[in-house]
Structures are given as C-alpha cells and as structure tokens.
Image: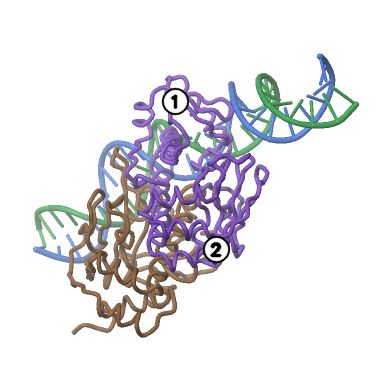
Chain colours: A brown, B purple, C green, D blue
Amino acid sequence: MASNDDDPFQRLFAKLARLAPLDDDDRRAVAGLPFKVVTVGSGHYLVREGDKPEVCCLLLRGYACRHKATSAGDRQIVSFHMPGDLLDVQHILLTQADHNVQTIGEAVVALIPAAALKRVARERSALNEALWRDSLIDASIFREWVLNVGRRDARSRIAHMLCEFAVRRRAAGLGEPERFEMPMTQNEIADATGLTSVHVNRMLQSLKEEGVLERNRGLIVIHDWNRLRDIADFDPEYLHAAA
Amino acid sequence: MASNDDDPFQRLFAKLARLAPLDDDDRRAVAGLPFKVVTVGSGHYLVREGDKPEVCCLLLRGYACRHKATSAGDRQIVSFHMPGDLLDVQHILLTQADHNVQTIGEAVVALIPAAALKRVARERSALNEALWRDSLIDASIFREWVLNVGRRDARSRIAHMLCEFAVRRRAAGLGEPERFEMPMTQNEIADATGLTSVHVNRMLQSLKEEGVLERNRGLIVIHDWNRLRDIADFDPEYLHAAA
DNA sequence: CGTAGGTTTGACTGATCTCAAGTTTGGTGG
DNA sequence: CCACCAAACTTGAGATCAGTCAAACCTACG
C-alpha cells in the first residue's frame, strides 16, 4: 500500500507549491502529467554523462547523487538528492547530460517525460516559475559547494555537507535534523567533499571525539548542532528557504 | 561614439538568440526593455551578498566575477564574466543575493530592471526559454567548477580555468582563443581555483617553462592549445555550446 | 562460515600553504 | 623627466594538511 509520500502527484505538487504560489489550474496540470513509477537498485544510473535523457526523475524514496569525473577517474559528487527532489529538470532545455545521476541505496522514482513537463512549464506560468526557481536554487547550492570544496578545510567541508543535508531534509518534511538516516558511505562523503575516504574517516572520528556528532552505518546523530554549524561555517541563506 | 558592441539591445539580443530561436516579436520585446548604461570603476560591487537587487546587469565592456567568502574571510570566485554576459538573471526569481558580483577592471554595464525582464520572460515563451537556458548553463559551469576545485591538481585547475575562459570568449564572439586579454591578477586566479597566489605563480611559471602558454600582465598567449587542453582535462561539452 | 564492502589504523610522502623578504611594474605628482 | 608609491609579482625556506599505500578489522548477508 503506497503511503501519501509515494504518490508522485502529491510529492511533485508539494515540491512545486513550495517554490511558487500555485492555483487549482496548476494543480490540475500537474495531476495530468504522465509518469511511470519504477524501483531501482543501489548504484543504479538514472542518467549518464553524454545521454540525451527524455525523462525527468522525481525521487520518491531513497537517495541519489549527481557526479562527474576527471579523465583520470577521480570522482566528484556535485549534489545529493532526497525524496521529493526533482532531478534533471535541466533536460527540459538542455539536450545532453553533462553529469551522471546515480542512486544511493535502493530508490523509487517517478519518470516524467521531459516533453510533458516542458509543455506545462510553457502553458502555466506559475509552474514555469516554480521549475525555473528550482533550477536557480540548484545553482546557488553549486556555488556554495565551490566555496566549500575550494576554501574550507576537511572538517568544515564534511560538517557543512552534513548541515546542508540535515536542513534540506527538514525543509522537505523528512523529519528533524538532529537524527536521520544518511545512507552514504565514507567514500561517498569523500567524493562529495574532494577528500579521500581515509581522511574522512579520521575527521569523523575527531568530530565524534569532540561530542559533535556520531555516525554509525547510515545513521547520523547530531549532539551539538550549534557547534556543528560553527565548524561548518554554515549559513542556510544560500538554500533560499527551499531546495 | 558607441560601437555596435556597446548597444545593449544588440548585445542582449545576440546573447538570447544564441540560446533559443527568437522571432520578430521577441526582438521587439527585447528592444522595448528599459535600461540604463553606467560605467563603473575596477573592483566596483554590482551586487553584494544579502542585497535584494532590482536590476539585472548586462555586461557591455570589461570583466566581472561572482564570489563568496567563508566567515574566516577566504574568498572563492565562483564564475568569471565577459562582455555579453547577463548577470543576476536569478534575481528575476530569487529575492536575495547569495553572492557578490564585482567588476574586474573598469566596466560598462546596462542595468535592466528585473521586473521588466521578468515580464518579457512571462509574456514571450522563447525569451523565457532563452533566459532559463542561460541559468541552466550557468549551473552546469558551477558543477564543472566543483569538479575542478575538488579533484584536479593545481596546474590542471589553472589550465582548466584558462581553457574555459578562452572558449567562452570565442563563443561570445570576442576573438580567437590563442591570444587574449584576461585582466585578472594571480591573486584572482588563486581565488577562482582554490589556491594561493604564491602557488599560482609557480604553476604559471611551470606552464611557461614547458612552452604551453605565457602570461604578461593581462595578456594570455597560448602556444600549445592541445597540450593545455590535455593538462586541463578540458572537455567543452559542459558549456552546452553557449555560455 | 565465507565473502565483499565498508571501516579503521599506522607509517610515510608530498602537494600546497605560510611567512617573509625582495623585485618589478605602472601610474602619479612634483 | 624623475622620484616615489602601491600593487602585483617572485623567490626561498620551512611547516602542515591531506594523500598514499598497505594491512587488518568489522559486519551484514548469502
């Protein structure tokens, strides 16, 4: 039995309504979007760099990340995604994927034809605004990541990533930020922060020793949010109260 | 006497027409946009983080960059801009600026009220598409910068930044990529690549010793483009043939 | 109970930073 | 035309954060 949260229309409408004021006609337009729900395994590639995707993914359950790699094979994760996030909105207007999208753990996604999404974005200006706004916030997050990876030290980078994750989770209505599932490995944290997994391990230990947070398998428990925020140099303004 | 390149309408229309097919009505809509041309000195802040800007800037002459800083004061440049670039498109939909915009050298900009731009974006779907597409390409460039700063070594980062600059210049019709003015200091290159100016200096020397390129004051001369591209691990796909 | 993926540890290396002192450059005012 | 100044650039020596490599240890799961 599907919970409310697994209903693609509910999820998508809730997301877009947070980004722009929507009326009943917008609601109907969203409700009329065709989609297909699929369950995919851990590490499944939803999009590969160079693809010409014809669908946008709405993440219903599970997590995903976007990443790119150098030709030497070093991987850099550029964003994390959680239930309610709309991936690949850009494929409404950009033909070719410039990065990979991969699930982290098993995930359930709704596939929405990009052409259909493009049509409602063209016909309903409030939906246009919501989708465009979503991609602008996306870009703001990337800017913050450039700063994070370019100018913060290892501990701060990791702390910052965790703060962002916690705050976005809450904004998406996925529960409180002090204690949550974050199923990525230390290797994936390393790929997101431009570090190695060995060093991530040591930094997480140092954060634990100081009583800031704990991480066991996928569970994060933040003991001292203020201290974490300070270490992270985290200011949520760049999330533009959404994302 | 203003050259063609200094005519805001020409510049803006040329830019947008590269992003989406525009017709005569679109042309008229662009021509009808109000604007004010101003000349500003080097280092002038066009936008400050936290501002609520009511204008978008079209860069007519000179260069600019967007940057953020940690609370410790370390600065990270997140993008460079050149004549023809439309800055702050995001302020059509996001109230508060999440980063600074600052000129590099003296610059001439056309200030276009965000509200007016928003109106034409709402009324003319081709212009909407062009502007949205522009912000999506922006985001793609940020993703590449996360990779650049997160996973490439110092030489590659600098080389990559130079490749991007050269290719975007050409795409914007500003001349050939083998030899061009790039008026930023080594300090600014450092801020864009997440390095220190001392190390940038040494890396530029090593690139010069190898006969890859030379840089004197603001002039860049690329002697061996293929080698530079290889060092940079540069693949222009992420620019989506525009930017 | 064997295996694979994930985590942890230790010893060593090295790329990049820091600090601090010069040097060059271009512009400015006398 | 020169003297001076600030900004940019250059150089050297030493410090350090993070990487590398390699081994061992968990732990979930088939």
x and y percentages locating residue B15 in the rendered image: 44, 49
Residue pointed to by mark 2: B114
Pointer 2 chain: B
Q: Mark 1 vs mark 2: which is more N-terminal?
A: 2
Horizontal relation, residue B185 to residue A174: left or right: right
Pointer 1 chain: B
x and y percentages locating residue A38 in the rendered image: 17, 70
- The three-letter amino acid code for the residue at tag 1 is Ile
Considering the image in quadrants, where does the N terminus of chain A appear? bottom left
Q: Residue at coordinates 50% horizontally, 46% vertically from top-left?
A: B84
Foreground residue among A30 and B110: B110
Q: Are marks 1 and 2 on the same chain?
A: yes
- The three-letter amino acid code for the residue at tag 2 is Ala
x and y percentages locating residue A166 in the rendered image: 42, 69
Badge number at residue B183: none
| Vertical position of residue B69 compared to residue B166: above or below | below
Residue pointed to by mark 1: B222
Q: Does dot 1 land on a helix, a strand or a loop?
A: strand
| Vertical position of residue A21 compared to residue A43: above or below | below
- When asked about the image quadrant of residue A139, the answer is bottom left
Q: Residue at coordinates 21% horizontally, 57% vertically from top-left?
A: A45
Q: How far apart are marks 1 and 2 (CA)?
A: 38 Å
**Local crowd size for mark 2, using a 10 Å CA cut-off: few (<14), some (14–19), many (≥20):** some
| Vertical position of residue B10 compared to residue B119: above or below | above
Decide if residue A214 is in sight here.
no
Horizontal relation, residue D30 to residue B151: left or right: left
**Local crowd size for mark 1, using a 10 Å CA cut-off: few (<14), some (14–19), many (≥20):** many
Foreground residue among A149 and B142: B142
Decide if residue B5 is in sight here.
yes
x and y percentages locating residue A91 in the rendered image: 29, 59
Q: Does dot 2 land on a helix, a strand or a loop?
A: helix
Considering the image in quadrants, where does the C terminus of chain A appear? bottom left
